[in-house]
Amino acid sequence: MTMTTKRRFSATAETVKRDLKKVVERMGATTLRVNQDILKGAVEIIFDRGGRRYVFRCERYNTSLDNMRAAQLAITYLWRALEEYGVSSSDDEIERTFSQFFIGFEATPDDSVLLLTDSNRQWWEVLGVEQGADKQAIINAYRALAKIHHPDTGGNPDDFRRLREAYETGLEVIK
């Protein structure tokens, strides 16, 4: 006898993906990635916009599809509230409001990326991106890491130089 889990949302995977793609495109996102843990049901929706990376996670429901729908709806409703009901009218005001509204979802680099001391690491490993990363992913990773490793914010100058070299190498490689 197979046990079925009652779904929270009735949307199909195709509908959720279509709706998610549509809203991040309207937001002006440059990348979109969805990570799913099928066994645990956890989902991460990751997108880059305006030089920043945002991560929405959900693991409240039993299925990854329900968690993906919940995260997609959260993104959609936050954006809709900003876009449709916001009182801002200029692009600058919308950007500032977006940054304030979504700041809680801005991604920070994971701890393994923060350890720049191994000089044998490849440029993509230093930046914490995939070897075939695109320009925007390289820029986003560099900006996030530079906030932490820049000497003006207490970072080590040698680590920052290695980070800068990895960034420049990554940009050269994709040209």
Image (cartoon, rainbow, N blue to C red):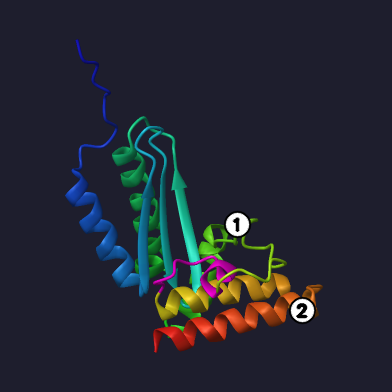
Q: Nearer the viewer, residue 119 or 157?
A: 119
Who's the residue at 62% across and 83% down the image?
165
Q: Nearer the viewer, residue 72 or 1?
A: 1
Q: Secondary structure at mark 1?
A: loop
Q: Which mark is residue 149?
A: none
Residue 68 as seen in the image, left or right of residue 13: right
Q: Position of residue 141 (x, y in %)?
A: 54, 71
Residue 21 in the image: above or below residue 70: below
Taking the magenta stretch, the answer to whether it contains residue 125 is yes
Q: Secondary structure at mark 2?
A: helix
User: Which amino acid, mark 1?
Assistant: Asp
Residue 26 seen in the figure: yes
Question: Looking at the image, is mark 1 or mark 2 earlier in the sequence?
Answer: 1
Residue 32 as seen in the image, left or right of residue 137: left
Residue 82 in the image: above or below residue 64: below
- Mark 1 and mark 2 residues within 8 Å of each other at the beta carbon: no
Who's the residue at 42% across and 40% down the image?
42
Residue hosting label 1: 110
Image quadrant occupied by the N terminus? top left
Q: Position of residue 103 (x, y in %)?
A: 56, 63
Residue hosting label 2: 158
Image quadrant occupied by the C terminus? bottom left
Residue 116 sits in quarter = bottom right
Residue 153 sits in quarter = bottom right
Start-end of magenta stretch: 123-133
Who's the residue at 53% across and 76% down the image?
96
Residue 97 seen in the figure: no
